[in-house]
Image: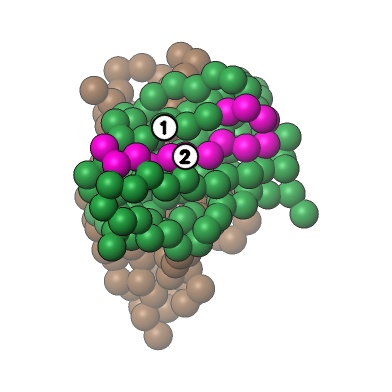
């Protein structure tokens, strides 16, 4: 079955620690996205990538970093510079096509908690 | 700046009653409009979208939404809800000018009561 997988489902971060969230897709989609979801705030875009080896900052990129070395993978690192990382993180992908028209397909999410 | 407003954070409704979830957007340019649904502890799934053509769009599970350009709205409706419709619903816009960025509303939590 095609889809998007995110791991782990739950992640705990200690003070000053960097953690990496995994996102893999086998849908052959070119574009991939990372969102942060907080209660009452909807989804906010962290980073997005339209092709391999290229990515752009979203609205709340500070304290996060990404890489896009393979089409299938778009890992997100939450660095120690992100002072309030507790949130639900969602990865998404979309097909190439007319920009803005394509449906985004979401993974099941990773819940990050700070110890 | 462009934005999406979902005024109702929570909407309780009895089973088999009708429901409307409101969505308004603020934009000076043409938009595409989407409704996504999120079940507890899951990712989002597309419910329906408006790209062009008929302003009334329907989903396979009985929801419909109507694009109203003059009122900059895209309200979601269902004539008779089921317990299984309990979820959070997000309205989103993208722009016809060629960006890949979505702007999401803050979500409306629909709770269907027995």
Q: Earlier in the sequence, mark 1 or mark 2?
A: 1
- Seen from the viewer's position, the closer of residues B114 and B95 is B95
Crowding near pointer 2: few (<14 within 10 Å), some, many (20+)? many
- Seen from the viewer's position, the closer of residues A111 and B48 is A111
User: Any mark on residue A27, and which?
Assistant: none
Left or right? Give the position of B42 relative to A111: right
Task: Classify mark 2: helix, strand or loop.
Answer: strand
Q: In which quarter of the image is residue A94?
A: top right
Q: Are marks 1 and 2 in contact (CB under 8 Å)?
A: yes
Q: Mark 1 lies on which chain?
A: A
Q: Position of residue A62 (x, y in %)?
A: 29, 31
- Is residue A72 one of those drawn in magenta? yes
Distance of label 1 from label 2 (alpha carbons)? 6 Å
- Seen from the viewer's position, the closer of residues A93 and B28 is A93
Residue where numbered disc 1 is placed: A65
Task: Classify mark 1: helix, strand or loop.
Answer: strand
Q: Where is residue A36 in the image (x, y as percent from the top left)?
A: 37, 45
Crowding near pointer 1: few (<14 within 10 Å), some, many (20+)? some
Q: Quadrant of the N terminus of chain A?
A: bottom right
Q: In which quarter of the image is residue A61?
A: top left
Say if A55 sits above or below B77 in the image: above
Q: Give the range drawn in magenta.
A: A68-81
- The brown-tinted chain is B
Q: Residue at x 54, y 19 (%)?
A: A54
Q: In which quarter of the image is residue A98?
A: top right
Residue where numbered disc 2 is placed: A76
Q: Residue at x 30, y 71 (%)?
A: B12
Q: Chain A is drawn in which colour?
A: green
Q: Where is residue B66 in the image (x, y as percent from the top left)?
A: 44, 42
Q: Quadrant of the C terminus of chain A?
A: bottom left
């Amino acid at each position: 079955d095609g889809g998007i997988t995110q791991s782990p489902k739950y992640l705990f971060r200690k003070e000053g620690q960097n953690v990496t969230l995994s996102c893999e897709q086998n849908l052959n989609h070119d574009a991939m996205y990372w969102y942060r979801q907080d209660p009452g705030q909807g989804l906010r875009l962290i980073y997005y990538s339209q092709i391999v080896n290229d990515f752009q900052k979203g609205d709340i990129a500070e304290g996060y970093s990404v890489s896009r070395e393979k089409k299938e993978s778009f890992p997100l690192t939450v660095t120690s510079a992100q002072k309030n990382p507790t949130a639900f993180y969602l990865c998404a992908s979309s097909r190439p096509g007319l920009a803005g028209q394509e449906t985004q397909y979401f993974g099941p999410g990773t819940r990050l908690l700070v110890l | 700046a462009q934005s999406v407003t979902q005024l109702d954070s929570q909407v309780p409704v009895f089973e088999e009653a009708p429901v409307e979830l409101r969505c308004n957007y603020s934009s000076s340019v043409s938009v595409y409009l989407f409704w996504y649904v999120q079940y507890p502890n899951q990712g989002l799934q597309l419910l329906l979208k408006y790209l062009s053509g008929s302003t009334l769009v329907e989903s396979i599970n009985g929801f419909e939404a109507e694009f109203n350009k003059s009122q900059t709205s895209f309200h979601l409706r269902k004539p008779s809800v089921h317990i299984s419709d309990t979820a959070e619903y997000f309205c989103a816009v993208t722009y016809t000018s060629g960006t890949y960025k979505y702007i999401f509303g803050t979500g409306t939590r629909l709770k269907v009561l027995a």
